[in-house]
DNA sequence: TGATTGCGTGCAATCGATTGCGCAAAAAGG
DNA sequence: CCTTTTTGCGCAATCGATTGCACGCAATCA
């Protein structure tokens, strides 16, 4: 039962191990009846090929490593789902590690991927250190980065979301509703993503001929509801003179926190204040009020990344197609409304 | 650079490969200076041991497989985090597969775990088929089940949450607030978990001398907000004669959906209707109103499961300690309130 | 009938590490 | 100064699969 090998099968079938190996992988030079006999013998004996032995010989593990910074991030889990679906459909398996933004853990994760000889690594960790990227390069492991175009090494591919486009869409929506005092609630930990979103915000304001006010730009310390609430309170206090009538947030979770802060300040969404999120997290439709946000194609991001990885491994992709940019879609719900006639 | 082996090192150091191997694993019979020399040579050459080759020889991969049904489930991601933290701290890696409640995928996942010779499998998929469990047993792979005590095979361990205790706590809380017409909003897909929660609900009602009404028990088709909303609507319509004043839900997400349905019906939480969730999902504190729920020790569940797995692998655990039961904690927030004086 | 082609298999090396056993040289003991 | 013991290291087999090469035999062709 436990641990039948091709040798065992070979013996029982009265052939050589090599024949068993070939029969099992449908090698053309193996006779049909031999193949049949071996196949059924293998089933009968409960043979499970050893990916370990195979990997040693072929130096391909059919395993892709994935590094995320927080497993529990709803954005990342959707990405992960896209990756997993794609890999599983192609017979690949998934090796997961979380860095938790800890450099030590990040290093151990990359190390583990190296030791286990994964065929490639997909990284969705906005602040992966370039040191790690070099490490991967040394290992000769190709990698694809999600939403992080910092690196352009030979074996590095990239899939990202068009942040500027997204912010333009969001801002147009809010501006069309008549808002002029629009704040941006960012995320210090957001890395390049945060930067691009803020740029998009500023560009859109400029294009609409609106002023960019420094006191309308607040950066939370992370992307969690708590940080959103805190930043929102800061915004409401610092800008008492002229409270914004709309706030666009770095992501849905911060927006959720912000909502609570707004309620606690005795204001209402969207009557007194319009609010937008980002990502279109599953629960966003059920917030109270349902959140206007931008649907980032998270699943597709993961799917694209995995597809790219597989193509790269099969040599179907060259340096030309090293990057892929995806666009999402504005989702208007009820957290945004017209500019209040009588400002509070 | 790419792929230095112990042979390469041995050659450069002028010793045998076996010496290199032993030096690298701090074998006592290797001289200190030799060890030193080899160590630094290995670093210098960028040596990365092959877990594949090692695994082949030792038949231990230091990899634990994890099977979940939905990666994107916020409950499971916390469990996963507990597992990942624990494993990583012990030098183990994590192999992840999602079954998506699909039998085919489930089979492929188990198959992949078998082929890759993982040392053990942790399963957090309420409805794993017993067929798969047998498969694992045949493979000789030990497993620990999370929140699923169906199997008690030789190499199967179990970690679970005390559902009945939890429901008693929730019900006591609601009953103390004066409620008598209390509904249960369950989850058909919840498997044994759903069953136990409903039993706990019924027991607690009985103990309080309250009647169990069949029309106060509704089962949603899954554990998502949408299903919660739908079930809530059904409840409000079917029980128009005598609407419950409190509803305890299978989980937080269903409660969130239910909240929306209640709002849309023109009722208010908790003024007209008290509502409770289950799990204490991260966002629950930010719902509007913040959700009264039961904190299931998700992280600890994962931690326990992983710890148990590691102990089992080290032979530190016998059949006696095959199961571990954890208790969570009632979290009272603002979705529950006193029984309304004047029923709607 | 003898030479050629092609089909079906077997031989043996290989991937990279681990490990029991054995053998020297050095240290300890008499 | 000659045994023992200890220390330090090498030999070679092994884990389970893959794969280039070669070989025997039957069918085909000249």
Image (cartoon, coloured by chain):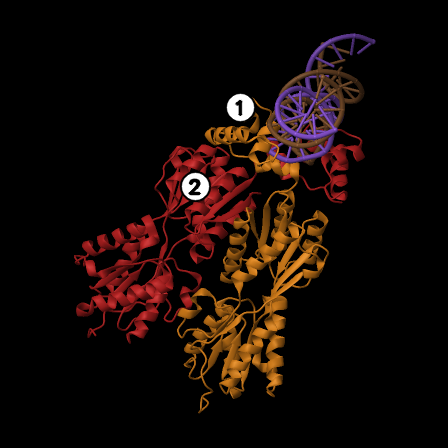
Chain colours: A orange, B red, C brown, D purple
Chain ID at mark 1: A
Asked if one can make out residue B198 in the rendered structure from this viewpoint, the answer is yes
Q: What residue did someone put label 2 on? A: B144
**How many residues crowd mark 2 within 10 Å: few (<14), some (14–19), many (20+)?**
many
Asked if one can make out residue B292 in the rendered structure from this viewpoint, the answer is no
Q: Disc number at residue A13?
A: 1
Q: Quadrant of the N terminus of chain B?
A: top right
Above or below, B333 against A77 in this view is: below
Question: On the picture, is A228 further left or further right than B130?
Answer: right
Which of the 4 image quarters holds residue A35? top right
Label 1 to label 2: alpha-carbon separation: 37 Å
For numbered disc 1, what is the local secondary structure?
A: helix
Tell if the residue under mark 1 belongs to the same chain as the one under mark 2. no
Q: Nearer the viewer, residue B203 or B131?
A: B131
Which of the 4 image quarters holds residue A201? bottom right
**Residue shown at 61% from the left, 87% from the top:** A211
Which of the two marks, 1 or 2, is nearer to us in this view? 1
| Residue B88 place in picture, x, y as percent | 56, 46
For numbered disc 2, what is the local secondary structure?
A: strand
- Please count the marks in the image: 2
**Residue shown at 19% from the left, 54% from the top:** B206
| Residue C12 place in picture, x, y as percent | 70, 24
| Residue A206 place in picture, x, y as percent | 62, 84
């Amino acid at each position: 039962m436990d641990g039948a090998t091709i040798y065992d099968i070979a013996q029982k079938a009265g052939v050589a191990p090599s024949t068993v190996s070939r029969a099992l992988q449908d090698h053309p030079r193996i006779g049909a009846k031999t193949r049949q006999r071996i196949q059924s013998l293998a089933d009968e004996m409960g043979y499970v090929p050893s990916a370990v032995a195979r990997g040693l010989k072929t130096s391909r593990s059919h395993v892709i490593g994935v590094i995320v910074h927080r497993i529990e991030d709803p954005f990342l889990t959707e990405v992960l789902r896209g990756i997993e679906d794609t890999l599983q459909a192609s017979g690949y398996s998934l090796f997961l590690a979380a860095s938790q933004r800890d450099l030590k853990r990040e290093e151990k994760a990359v190390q583990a991927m190296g030791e286990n000889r994964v065929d490639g690594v997909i990284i969705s960790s906005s602040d992966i250190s370039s040191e790690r990227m070099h490490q991967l390069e040394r290992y000769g492991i190709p990698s694809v980065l999600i939403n992080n175009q910092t690196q352009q090494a030979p074996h590095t591919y990239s899939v990202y979301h068009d942040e500027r486009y997204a912010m333009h869409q969001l801002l147009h929506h809010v501006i069309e509703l008549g808002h002029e005092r629009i704040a941006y609630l960012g995320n210090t930990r957001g890395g390049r993503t945060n930067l691009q979103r803020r740029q998009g915000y500023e560009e859109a304001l400029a294009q609409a001929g609106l002023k960019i006010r420094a006191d309308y730009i607040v950066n939370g310390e992370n992307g969690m509801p708590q940080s959103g609430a805190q930043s929102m309170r800061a915004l409401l206090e610092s800008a008492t003179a002229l409270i914004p009538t709309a706030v666009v947030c770095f992501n849905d979770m911060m927006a959720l926190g912000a909502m609570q802060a707004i309620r606690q300040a005795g204001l209402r969404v969207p009557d007194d204040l319009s609010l937008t999120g980002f990502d279109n997290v599953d629960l966003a439709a059920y917030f109270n009020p349902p959140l206007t946000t931008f649907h980032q194609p998270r699943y597709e991001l993961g799917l694209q990344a995995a597809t790219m990885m597989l193509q790269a491994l099969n040599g179907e992709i060259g340096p030309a197609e090293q990057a892929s940019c995806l666009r999402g879609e504005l989702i208007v719900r009820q957290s945004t409304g017209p500019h209040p006639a009588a400002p509070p």
